[in-house]
Image (tube, rainbow, N blue to C red):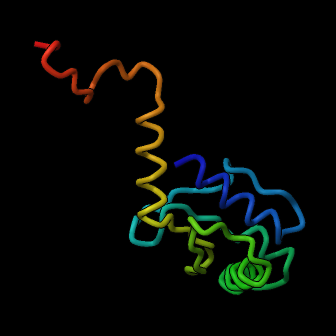
Amino acid sequence: MERFARQAADALSQVLPSPVTAAQIEIPKDSKLGDFAFPCFRLAKEMRKSPGDAAKEIVKQMTEKNALPASLRAAAVGPYVNFTVTSEDALRALLGDILKGTGNGEYGRYGGAEST
């Protein structure tokens, strides 16, 4: 899921004055809120808005600039910009990592008659 956190950071970096790193992206305590969250408390002071209004403005800017990749959805939830990874993209990434991973041995491979 790190790749999606980097995508969220890249999308935020396109609309914010300072670059955002994946390390600044948090995991919400309640998974119903999204897969990742970006707190807007510090930015709110710079933007001279409440944290909730800052989050709404950031989501609006990302949408207007088409900064979000197709694999992510963003929503302002209170003082956070929350990101949700589409199920299809999450599964595709997970399965891709499993299938190309090293050290997987022969797990799940059918060896046919010669494997008996």
Question: Would you place residue 2 above or below residue 75 in this image?
Answer: above
Return the residue nearer the eye: 95 or 3. 95
73 vs 16, left or right, is left
Return the residue nearer the eye: 55 or 98. 98
80 vs 65, left or right, is left
Q: Position of residue 55 (x, y in %)?
A: 68, 79
Q: Position of residue 78 (x, y in %)?
A: 57, 81
At 42% from the left and 35% from the top, the residue drawn is 99
Q: Residue furthest left?
A: 116
Query: Residue 69 falls in which quadrant of the image?
Result: bottom right
106 vs 67, left or right, is left
Q: Position of residue 89 (x, y in %)?
A: 48, 59
Q: Position of residue 31 (x, y in %)?
A: 40, 65
Question: Would you place residue 28 above or below residue 80 in this image?
Answer: above
At 74% from the left and 51% from the top, the residue drawn is 21
Query: Residue 104 falls in which quadrant of the image?
Result: top left
Total numbered labels placed on residues in the image = 0
At 87% from the left and 61% from the top, the residue drawn is 18
At 49% from the left and 49% from the top, the residue drawn is 93
Return the residue nearer the eye: 15 or 100. 100
Q: Residue furthest right?
A: 17
Return the residue nearer the eye: 45 or 31. 31
19 vs 21, left or right, is right
